[in-house]
Amino acid sequence: MIRSILIHPDPRLKKVCDPVAEITAEVTALANDMLETMYDAPGIGLAAPQIGVMKRVLVMDCIKDGPPEPMVLINPAVIWSSEDVATYEEGCLSIPDQYAEVKRPAEVQVRWLGLDGVEHERQFAGLWATCVQHEIDHLDGKLFIDYLGPLKRQMITRKMEKLKRERARSV
Ligand code: NI
């Protein structure tokens, strides 16, 4: 089921999410809905708080050409970050049509729980590294615009407030 994506500013996008205690049918259904919602948007990553679920679950697929590689990460944690940094122009499904360059560690080692109930670990590089860090930030109530200067951030926030007013009127 495709869920509706919250648009910034929203208090739910500012909260620290709760860890998932165990993999249940409900968690699996949530992950499937998140993947469906992400591919439909379309986007390369989505975190549970973006659909108003305050749990530490994220999905992503950074493959642009070739067969899809859907990933579901539950309770993900960065356990190592490279000193090298990379700059990517980031966007966010909760901040539509706004993009800005963000600097982050170029590679990260991440540990998470899979839907199979097993702990996984992988080193991410390139776009995957940026995406996984962006999505983990969401689980801690952080958005990519929090890395920008206050003026740029306020400008984007005002645009989003205007967008939300327009959308509310057109319903
Ligand atoms: Ni985002």
Image (cartoon, rainbow, N blue to C red):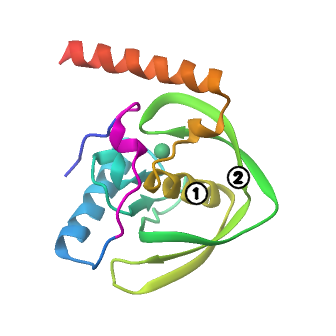
Q: Quadrant of residue 165?
A: top left
Q: Is residue 11 left or right of residue 127?
A: left
Q: Is residue 18 left or right of residue 67?
A: left
Looking at the image, which residue is at 21% across and 14% down?
170
Type of amino acid at the residue the image marks with label 1: Gln
Residue on which the image places disc 1: 133
Q: Is residue 169 left or right of residue 115?
A: left
Q: Is residue 136 magenta?
A: no
Type of amino acid at the residue the image marks with label 2: Arg
Contact, CB < 8 Å: mark 1 with mark 2?
Answer: yes
* Secondary structure of residue under mark 2: strand
Residues drawn in magenta? 7-19
User: In the rendered image of this protein, does residue 129 appear above or below residue 170?
Assistant: below
Which numbered disc, 1 or 2, marks the residue that appears first in the sequence?
A: 2
Looking at the image, which residue is at 37% across and 63% down?
57
Looking at the image, which residue is at 41% across and 60% down?
59
Residue on which the image places disc 2: 104
Residue 93 at x, y percent in the picture: 43, 39
Residue 166 at x, y percent in the picture: 30, 13
Q: Quadrant of residue 78?
A: bottom right
